[in-house]
Amino acid sequence: MKIFNSDDLPEPKTILEATADAVNLAAEQRAREAYDKHMKEVNLGITNSTSSLADISTLLSLHQAAEAQALGVFSARPKLGEESAAKANKDNLVKYFATRHEEYKRTVQQNIRIEEEKRKLEAERKRIAAEQEAERQRIKAEEERIRREKAENERRQREEAERLRRQREENERWQRDEQARIQRERNELARQQREAEERGRREALAAEMERQMAARYSTPRYSYAPSFSSSNSGSGSSSGVRELHFMRRGKQVTAYHDGRHFCKKPSDYDG
């Protein structure tokens, strides 16, 4: 209907020319489909996610490979009519490939910008995370320092308390030892005094007994005991020891005298 409604009439063509146009048009369509299919399969990673500006050059090499493949599909068409008749279809393909390449290029550039923004955001996020981590570490280190100082102060306090306790115990022990030493000295002095008093009392009692026996009792009857001498006693004598018998308060009393003073019974020197 468009042909009949337009003012321009189509150029008349032979059946061969019309068939050649149809074959060329179909080959052009298959070439476009081949290009798009290749770019979608091979270039999918770049069109969806780009990591660097170098992907632009990668895209160009993939575009050229897809274009060569698509032109190969177009060239494999059945050859009908003049080769010049297919030139328009080939020119259309070249324009189409260039247009599609620009579209892919814009997509890649957009992906590059998005990826760059993502990298910036990620870098900023890492920077903030690093600063937060550094702040946490600083706070943790400060808390650890305070904890160590507190522990050190507590340790010093315990050591000081322990030192004072040991010093107090040492002073108390020294005082007890000193008091015990003083008490021992007092006890020793008291013992020596008691011994001295006991010796004095015994000597006085012996002297008194000798005096009384010599002055107050009747003349004793006596008999001689066998001679006694002992090299161990150191008080032996060649003279005999007299055994004295006298009455004291109605009781018979026996004493021994070596000629100078009263002494022990001779048998007491044995052993």
Image: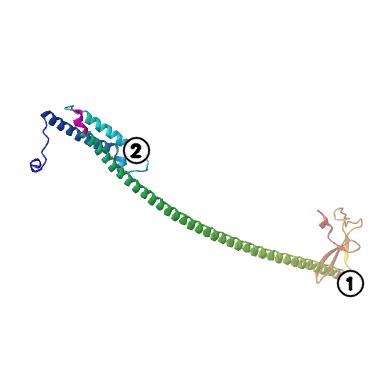
Q: Which residues are magenta?
A: 82-87
User: Foreground mark, 2 or 1?
Assistant: 2
Q: Is residue 110 above or below residue 208?
A: above
Residue sitting at 25 percent across and 38 percent down?
Answer: 95
Mark 2: amino acid: Thr
Is residue 113 shown left or right of residue 228? left
- Read off the residue under disc 1: 215
Report how many numbered discs are placed on residues in the image.
2
In the rendered image, residue 176, in percent from the top left (x then y), is placed at 68, 65
Is 91 part of what is drawn in magenta? no
Q: Which mark is residue 58?
A: 2
Mark 1: amino acid: Ala
Mark 2 and mark 1 lie on one chain; the one further toward the N terminus is 2
In front: 196, or 161? 161
Crowd class of label 2 (few under 14; some 14 to 19; many from 20; radius 10 Å): few
Q: How is the rendered protein coloured?
A: rainbow
* Structural distance between the alpha carbons of marks 2 and 1: 154 Å
In the rendered image, residue 239, in percent from the top left (x then y), is placed at 92, 57
- Secondary structure, mark 1, is helix
